[in-house]
Amino acid sequence: MTTIDLGLPGLAGVPTADEPQKAKDYKSDQEVRWCPGCGDYVVLNAVQSFLPTLGLKRENIVFISGIGCSSRFPYYMNTYGMHSIHGRAPAIATGLATARPDLSVWVVTGDGDALSIGGNHLIHTLRRNVNLKILLFNNRIYGLTKGQYSPTSETGKVTKSTPMGSLDHPFNPISLALGAEASFVGRAIDSDRAGLTEVLRQAAEHRGSALVEIYQNCPIFNDGAFDVLKDAGEAEQRLIPLQHGKPIRFGANGEYGVVRAGFGSLDVAKVSEVGEDALVVHDAHAEDPSFAFALSRLSTQDLSHTVTGVFRSVTRPTYDDAARAQVDDAKASRAADLGSLLRGKDTWTVIA
Amino acid sequence: MTTIDLGLPGLAGVPTADEPQKAKDYKSDQEVRWCPGCGDYVVLNAVQSFLPTLGLKRENIVFISGIGCSSRFPYYMNTYGMHSIHGRAPAIATGLATARPDLSVWVVTGDGDALSIGGNHLIHTLRRNVNLKILLFNNRIYGLTKGQYSPTSETGKVTKSTPMGSLDHPFNPISLALGAEASFVGRAIDSDRAGLTEVLRQAAEHRGSALVEIYQNCPIFNDGAFDVLKDAGEAEQRLIPLQHGKPIRFGANGEYGVVRAGFGSLDVAKVSEVGEDALVVHDAHAEDPSFAFALSRLSTQDLSHTVTGVFRSVTRPTYDDAARAQVDDAKASRAADLGSLLRGKDTWTVIA
Amino acid sequence: MSTGVDGGAAATGTPRSVTKLDRVVIRFAGDSGDGMQLTGDRFTSEAAAFGNDLSTMPNFPAEIRAPQGTIPGVSSFQVHFADYDILTPGDRPDVLVAMNPAALKANIADLPAGGTLIVNTDEFVKRNLTKVGYAASPLEDDSLAAYQVHQVAMATITQNALADTGLGKKDAERCKNMFALGLLSWMYHRPTEGTERFLREKFAKKPDIAEANVLAFRAGFYYGETTEAFAVTYEVAPAKLAPGTYRQITGNTALAYGIVAAAQQSKLPVLLGTYPITPASDILHELSKHKQFGITTFQAEDEIAGICAALGASYGGALGVTSTSGPGVALKSETIGLGVMTELPLIVIDVQRGGPSTGLPTKTEQADLLQAMYGRNGESPVPIVAPQSPADCFKAALEATQIALTYRTPVLLLSDGAVANGSEPWLVPDVDDLPDLTVEFATEPNSPDGTAFWPYLRDPETLARAWAVPGTAGLQHRIGGLEKADGTGNISYEPDNHDRMVRLRQAKIDGIPVPDLEVDDPTGKARVLVLGWGSSYGPIGAACRRVRKLGHSVAQAHLRNLNPFPANLGAVLRSYDKVVVPEMNLGQLALLLRGKYLVDVVSYTKVAGLPFKAEELQNVLTDIVKGVDAA
Amino acid sequence: MSTGVDGGAAATGTPRSVTKLDRVVIRFAGDSGDGMQLTGDRFTSEAAAFGNDLSTMPNFPAEIRAPQGTIPGVSSFQVHFADYDILTPGDRPDVLVAMNPAALKANIADLPAGGTLIVNTDEFVKRNLTKVGYAASPLEDDSLAAYQVHQVAMATITQNALADTGLGKKDAERCKNMFALGLLSWMYHRPTEGTERFLREKFAKKPDIAEANVLAFRAGFYYGETTEAFAVTYEVAPAKLAPGTYRQITGNTALAYGIVAAAQQSKLPVLLGTYPITPASDILHELSKHKQFGITTFQAEDEIAGICAALGASYGGALGVTSTSGPGVALKSETIGLGVMTELPLIVIDVQRGGPSTGLPTKTEQADLLQAMYGRNGESPVPIVAPQSPADCFKAALEATQIALTYRTPVLLLSDGAVANGSEPWLVPDVDDLPDLTVEFATEPNSPDGTAFWPYLRDPETLARAWAVPGTAGLQHRIGGLEKADGTGNISYEPDNHDRMVRLRQAKIDGIPVPDLEVDDPTGKARVLVLGWGSSYGPIGAACRRVRKLGHSVAQAHLRNLNPFPANLGAVLRSYDKVVVPEMNLGQLALLLRGKYLVDVVSYTKVAGLPFKAEELQNVLTDIVKGVDAA
Ligand SMILES: Cc1ncc(C[n+]2csc(CCOP(=O)(O)OP(=O)(O)O)c2C)c(N)n1
Ligand SMILES: Cc1ncc(C[n+]2csc(CCOP(=O)(O)OP(=O)(O)O)c2C)c(N)n1
Ligand code: SF4
Ligand code: SF4
Ligand SMILES: [Mg+2]
Ligand SMILES: [Mg+2]
């Protein structure tokens, strides 16, 4: 097992492949079973095309998912994988990642799986900063159970379980993750393969937990949920792509930008009105998550302003590295002498 | 049952008492069983002294708790109460508050109860904005199970379960709550009765979920955790009390203040250096939670800068009010005709 | 009652011979996207409107929409209708409608020789055939020689019929399921107004789609009538059911209605705290439509929050209900225990599915019985009620509520996938005949000295504790999960008190009066008893009828109360030479019966995700009965 | 072995008569803040070091520190030591040390007439007496006339003894528990170096406190020696145990060591994923100290995350372990089901406590057996192993690991509060004698055609599936909670496959070889068998000895394997006229035995949060034996 330092801290310890790989190497022999037109297909393809660029041994990659349409993802990957139970993938993956430094562990989850039943595991995984890449397929609906509202559904949504409209105020997954001390948070859209791949790349390179929210269309139960972010003419007004170190500008011709507002808030403005110097320069590495948080609040979840890209990416010790270090320290400083442990300090001897 | 509108939206619908009440009216006949010197005593007294000022019928007040030292609170209150199971108090209280508009429902919980096992219920309760007042006793340790670290314990803490030091990065309960869309978030310290009472008052007046973090000393397993916030000479440098509409100043003589920093962040500065005008004016009612979030990040959890008071208090529909409104709407617009429901649209008749 | 399209249209057309049948089983099978559930459902409604007895079984994949044209993507709906009271959806179809090669391949093994097969030929193209592993088209070799095959180009005909509507080709083709329905409706002389009305209502917002579907439906009907392909049509006369007003109902709907009725009859608001899960979600969907009855539905963040909210509502004096399937019960177990300790009413609905773990989410099973009995820490008894058929769910819900409210206890209601999604005619009860479920809350101090409220003072008869709800002046008290002192309810660590309380809680449940077990033994001579529970009532009943038809005596009894058992159960068991207990698990009821009554019951088990087939049980029972009678 | 303070000091002092005893039970009782657990623990260590057999039972309140001086605040520690092999911590104390009125009141009922009572008089002041409801001091009326009472002003004497140390009054008074320990050590001729060494180590960072404690300890010792108050001292000779090296060990420690040994013997890293809960937390505390053995301890956010992390680690080829108590098992049930379905090794430790719900967290009970067996959705069998005594936990952990690794299955390890916190001497095993637990992971394709890896291909003997861990080239595969095809492990909704897999999973567990049940029947004439499981081994054994001493024959057998049962169990049960099953629940094992073997076992149950008393069982058994023998 050759472990080559790729210069990617996120993947340190994971052995690299001897030969170049292709997308099809990552396709399993199982037939893909999503509805026609499901956004999950696009993401699957993007991931299968992206993984070869990491050059890792396939057998050292593991996909762990919960339950939901998106959570069938592992079956289609020619890697190791577990389709576990609803909401628990981050917890299972935490155990796996802690036990095995030589694996690249990916979690695939949905808005219901990750944020409803699995919310607690998600936030704890993020605060612990376990070395996991978490792909959250957000279709703002429960797909597998046939169309109930989810924790990211808009208030007032009429679904099978809310014939008079849903009442709950939705989570903003980015804000939630930042409130939960996430070290890496990004967002992408199923249809934007380049953007998605770029966020995946940065996530893979990040050492620690990386939460990637992926807006995913469910043509069956929530069709067109993200159409405004895809329609030419509409999308440019709404999409705010981030690039570290660059002023945050958007619009078909970069005519809009993000500026400071009040204390600790951000807002959108016309560049022509505020001037280029007023624009906020994106700093994904800011220690204080307040900036990333403010970015996540540029609009409510009506998609009127949707920031994509990497909101935050900071380096902090990871739980699994630290746990292994403690074991290593203990091994280095104390003998693993079972006999002496069992005897302890106070023994007596009975002679025959 | 007289329901008088107190002008306190938080308590609308809860009947008021006919006679003035005293603290001792709120003491139950059960012996209080915390360790000598436990901060829980002080909070209990503060609550028992505060409640009479609300002038509610005692029988319409309910305390629901989980499990932990702090969660024994309900036994000591001469109100209705349930000492439920670990982590679930917000979920139980959600059902109760939704079923009963005429109750003032309080949740008592600990840092383990609310943020470890109960984390998911907490964040969902906050995003739903259920009409609950949640008192989170944060002693940064598991008291009842005799001293393991908790999700708010400092990294590196040596406890019974972490002899080599804990590895997890702690939650900041205020940040977490804000990331979870909380409409009201406050913080107080057990020893500061006036401050605590003021936050309780505002929480009670708030319609919706109010999360109040209370720093509480556990003399047995984490003694002195908040001493730096109590020691004269020390405390003034560290404590940043909030008052809505006022510039944020602190220090023995108000020599420090809070100012903007970078994009979306806040920092602490000497007023003499930055000038009064640079000071941030506290706006608890800001629609955008970014400001409150930035306040919660003024320092890491080393208590070097600890903001107290009400970070955020904004009005938003509450889940329980809306759920009741849907039921009322349905009642108003559709007949509750059981016979016709049972028959449905397609019946046929078999004649004898 | 008219049976033709457009009123009397059926009277016209080629005269055909009409065969009278007493029962028919039809299975519609197609791709998940072909609308087979809707087709089957409508046919069922027609049969119901016609007055047949009926029983249905939908069968669909766990995927929302598995890849088109594949075996895993096949969805089917079986309906059994008859002129007498039937008990099951039928073991095998008499008629199989196969909309594509996958549907044919997946279902043909179930069609008995001589059965009728109606195939949509349009889908039998190379690509689709290869997809499911047909080397050659089965329509073109003689592999289907054993059946009466009707090849119909359903898609083409439908598209032609809709040519003038201006509808796109794809949309037009989508109506082919209605074509199939029309054809079958014609074959079986079904009334059709209901379906046309239904289509117009369903697509009220898209009138062109509504008309297209009606047209396709009629095209199917006329196709039967005008072509000569079908030599015979069939009549299944209305069933001679007990007089009254009937409707067709699925188990989940009946269960939801039972909860609505419980709300009305108890005059309590209901809070359903739940989390979606197959096959229980429809209970949430249904109840969320009926808020005017004082019903609040709370879709919680998970199963635990769902039951906790329900318990919180019960604490507040509402009727707390939670609905789930097996994996959800596992998650709820800790809170059920809190319900047992706090002695609060709570309805826990478990619509069982195939396990363990995620198992077979869309299939049926009865393997949660022991979980319901014992799946909690400590001695934590709860009553268990299990409906025996779709319509029976209504009564079961009322019974469970009555027990929960009277005894202040969580009650487990064990439905399953077969009962939940299956349907049958239901004799709609008169609202005035429903039981009174009103509760008396405590309003006064009740301690021996009359000054205090003791929440754990019990009614000497029911052993139910006094129940005071928040808002009741002077009765403030605290409850919780720690052991409590008998009477006062204060925390108690006292050894004898704990022992007493453990036994009191058990005695309370053991003492719940449940109806005696009734045995059906027409000859009075049976030496073998077949005892079932839950949804296997139908297949067991049907099997017993067949065994009797063969001239044997066999007794049948069915348990609706699994905890406590009926008082006469032991005596009944002991009065037979042999007791056979068929279960869709590995013998869970059998274990309880053996353990409690020391009777050597014979367990017959099958855990295949499907209801028993009557034929299978008939064979098993016949062998046993013969053996015993010969001995 | 020297027994005196400072080496030979015990030889000096007033000569006293020495009585030889074969066994003594001492109970130290005081306020939670009085350090009774430490005192008892030290006395136990002294007895152990002296070579007595011993057994202990701590008893503490659920509150961390209930209000001082109250009954609920009383904490006690009972130690039973003897010159022969004993089985229980003793029913009742021979000597009660009461540090305050509350301790006296809470414990005096257990002291038999004639027993020795040593009281710390300093606390018997008005306020404290009133607090616990003593109108007058029991030391001053004749309510204690039945006992040999020794009144000692322990606090005062201790303070005096420490006057020169410069320690504050309060700190000095705190050492009074060491005074009591010293006094008792003198009375029973205990070796004392161990305690002095212990105190110096414990307070290594506060040498003045260490010295003060040593001084107080010696003061107690000298007090006995110099005052004339105590006329007699006692000797309990070392026990004639099997030869070898012994240490004292509690159940939780032994269990943790068993896991450490399992790690060593399997050469696998261990990941303990857990969440603190009484009385299981000490397993976490202990294991977290032994990282050098390749043990990672993960304190998760809740029980579910704890077991999930353990399962994830097992998936990665580590040994996943999770530890909890009953309420935690309830929460873990869904994930245990996933472990059953994915067929991965997993150790689930349940240290049972009083239930249901939160119940009696610090008390013991055996009421999770049926939860362990059945507390999951679907047919979800798991092996169950239950240690019978504190030291036995070590072996049980190794056995559970061996089963989990060999059969790729979660294993339930059922300890309880009595076993967990109790202690006894343990014959320390030789590391070389421990079993080899190494596993063979799959490294090559195994499909019939040799090209693919089939994760559900089974070893024909064990039925264990092939286990390939991530990182193994060419064996990539996916597992999960959905039903899987026999062999390939692909998702399968096929009815027959499900039935087959359900039965295969059951057969795998049923086929685990467990040692035959051994029956202890010294006369060979017993007609009554007493069968227990888990921690009641001690009391049942003690009771049987007593019954036999009375001249009756009684057979005893004890189940360590609750699933599957030993192969000879049915035959054993049937070979006795009567089988009595004492349990600290309402008859859970009895139900299983009756259900499986149709034997009319007699269930004797007590659910009081305390272990059985040997006396109580003796009476029950004697009556039964007499009845059977007379019949
Ligand atoms: C314990 C448990 N509860 C509930 C379910 C049912 N269930 C399966 S997936 C799901 C939600 C799926 O929504 P999401 O995570 O958004 O995934 P999607 O299907 O939309 O991709 C639910 C409620 C389950 N399988 N297990
Ligand atoms: C299901 C369950 N898991 C674990 C426990 C054990 N337990 C009781 S309280 C507690 C943590 C208490 O910590 P915290 O909430 O901070 O309260 P504190 O005692 O510090 O006030 C734990 C782990 C339990 N009672 N139930
Ligand atoms: S239901 Fe929606 S999310 Fe699920 S597979 Fe179909 S399209 Fe995709
Ligand atoms: S352990 Fe700590 S938190 Fe608990 S009662 Fe004692 S002092 Fe208070
Ligand atoms: Mg979704
Ligand atoms: Mg705490």
Image (cartoon, coloured by chain):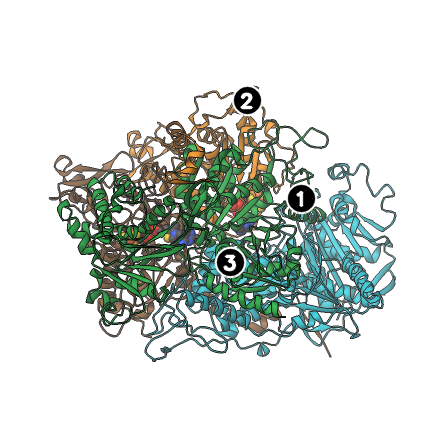
Chain colours: A brown, B orange, C green, D cyan
Q: Chain of mark 2?
A: B
Image quarter (top left, top right, bottom left or bottom right) of the N terminus of chain D? bottom right
Q: Secondary structure at mark 2?
A: loop
Q: Is D545 left, or right, of D605 in this rendering? A: right
State if disc 2 and disc 3 touch (CB < 8 Å): no
Where is residue C272? Give x, y as percent: 46, 41
- The residue labelled by disc 2 is B17
Q: Quadrant of residue D515?
A: bottom right
The residue located at (57%, 23%) in the rendering is B21
Using a 10 Å C-alpha cutoff, classify the residue at mark 1 as few (fewer than 14 neighbours), some (14 to 19) or many (20 or more): some
Mark sitting on residue C492? 1
Residue drawn at point x = 64 percent, y = 56 percent: C572
Disc 3 from disc 1: Cα separation: 56 Å
The chain letter under disc 1 is: C
Q: Residue type at mark 3: give it.
A: Arg
Q: Nearer the viewer, residue C367 or B292?
A: C367
* Chain letter of the residue carrying label 3: C
Q: Is residue C514 left or right of residue D93?
A: left
Disc 1 secondary structure class = loop
Q: Earlier in the sequence, mark 3 or mark 1?
A: 1
**Between C342 and D539, which is closer to the camera in this rendering?**
C342
